[in-house]
Amino acid sequence: MKIEFEHRQAAHCESGVTSNLLRDISNGKITEPLAFGMGAGLFFAHIPFIKINNGPAIAFRTFPGQIFNSTCKALGIPVIREKFRSKEKAEAFLNECLDEGHPVGCQVGVYYLPYFPREYRFHFNAHNLIVYGHEGDKYLISDPIMENPTTMDSYQLERVRFAKGTLAPRGHVYYPKKQAVITDEQIRQAIKNGIKKNVNRMLYIPGSFAGVSGIKSTGNKIKKWRDKLGLQKAGSYLAQLVRMQEEIGTGGGGFRYIYAAFLQEADAYLPGNQLAEISVMFTKAGDLWRTAAVQAAGIYKGRIGSQEDFNVMGDYLIEISALEKKAFLMLKNIKWQ
Amino acid sequence: MKKDEVPQDLSSLGKITKEVCYATDSNGKYTTELSSGWDVKIKALDVAWEDIQKRIAAAKQQVENNNASPLLFFMEYRLMDISILADYTGFWKWQIKRHLKPEVFNNLSENKLQRYADAFNIKVADLKSMTVHED
């Protein structure tokens, strides 16, 4: 059974899956950046007291599952989603969906994903891909990170669908219910919703671990890393920051470029709201994140490493925090035309 | 980032697939461009793996000195902590902590060893002998 489905590569797995699953009912209008923005995907959080792979727990995007959820909700599309205790039921449900002709989004763990190079395989359980058919024991896979579609056998697929650890997927599958084609008015509404949600997340989460205040606070922490952790461990921490920011699935600059692309596309739907100007600010933020990454690389490559170098690194984040705060305040104060 | 500034440093992922980056063209309009990798993040990943290799080597030494069972080695090799391994095997964490002792590990039943071998995606014989086949 093979469903008519065109694989399209994307920068980020979840916004890519969302955009690809909505292609039919949106006539291709829900691009990846639109899905990312409507789903309020941009974020920053540095969770204290938790370590991931023995380094700091830093995220540049919202919790897994939220982009698809929020985008569909904002567009008024009903969603089917299931999680399972039993592996057999999970496979049966997937086969049923495919036989009915629905391509299905799957949350999977990366660690045992057979087509990923070993260097990229960590116990990260919030990867997303689309299953769009099966031929005997072979499942047809559209992984938005990959240039080409690929396949997995039922054992391999079961293994990644039932990966264990934090955010274990438990066979999580989801797809949008078929319905009438989405109108431009729905898209406009969803853009406004997504922006509002993202403003709240970046500006108004209390405490200083998340949003623009989180960026500033991480900047201040970095300045202390050298004394607190020693040069080598501080370097490893910075490498982890850079990986979260730039590694596969961010589209570069810690998702800031995707968000800038979203605002530019949004401007075409909602002209006269300065969205294009604000988009330029996010491009600048993305550029600054990358400049900071180059500085960090100097440290973990061992080329530089004085306290002054850490201060410069920390100050980049403080500068980014101020810039993004300004941009989100502008988004907040839009009187929609 | 401008389209022509999208880095093209070949990474180990780049040999398998290029990644999509969002970048602006000469008119400032956003478009996508494929990247085969970026030196800055290749090095970041290298740093992460150097740390992991050190942990694996330390674990191996522990096992060879008979201070720990081969479980410790494969946990580091598979980047697992006790709670991930507990989830994969269905053992309690305290059981795994016991099994990390060589004398307890050596008396484990075939059945229990098989559960560990499945979690690590290896054979029982390799688990006992700490043999690694690259995959």
Image (cartoon, rainbow, N blue to C red):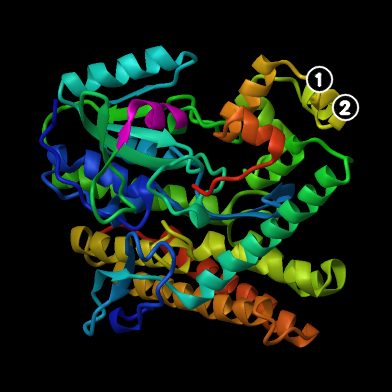
Residue A153 colored magenta? yes
Q: Name the residue under label 2.
A: B103
- Residue A38 located left or right of residue A332: left
Q: Are marks 2 and 1 in contact (CB under 8 Å)?
A: yes
**Magenta region, residue range:** A152-159
Marks 2 & 1 on one chain: yes
Where is residue A36 drawn, in percent x and y? 35, 51
Along the viewing direction, whichever of A55 and A33 lies nearer the viewer:
A55
Q: Quadrant of residue A230?
A: bottom right
Q: Report the chain holding disc 2.
A: B
Residue A18 colored magenta? no
* Quarter of the picture holding the C terminus of chain A: bottom left
Distance from the alpha carbon under mark 2 to that under mark 1:
7 Å
Q: Residue A163 carries which label?
A: none
Name the residue type under label 2: Glu
Q: Which mark is residue B107?
A: 1
Where is residue A159 drawn, in percent x and y? 46, 29
- Residue A43 located left or right of residue A134: right
The answer to whether residue B8 shows anywhere in this view is: yes
- Residue A46 located left or right of residue B20: right
Q: Residue at x 43, y 51 (%)?
A: A41
* Quarter of the picture holding the N terminus of chain A: top left
Name the residue type under label 1: Asn
Q: Which residue is drawn at 56% across and 64% down?
A: B45
Label 2's element? helix
Label 1's element? loop
Q: Which residue is drawn at 68% across and 56% down?
A: B52
Where is residue A195 drawn, in percent x and y? 39, 53
Q: Report the chain holding disc 1.
A: B
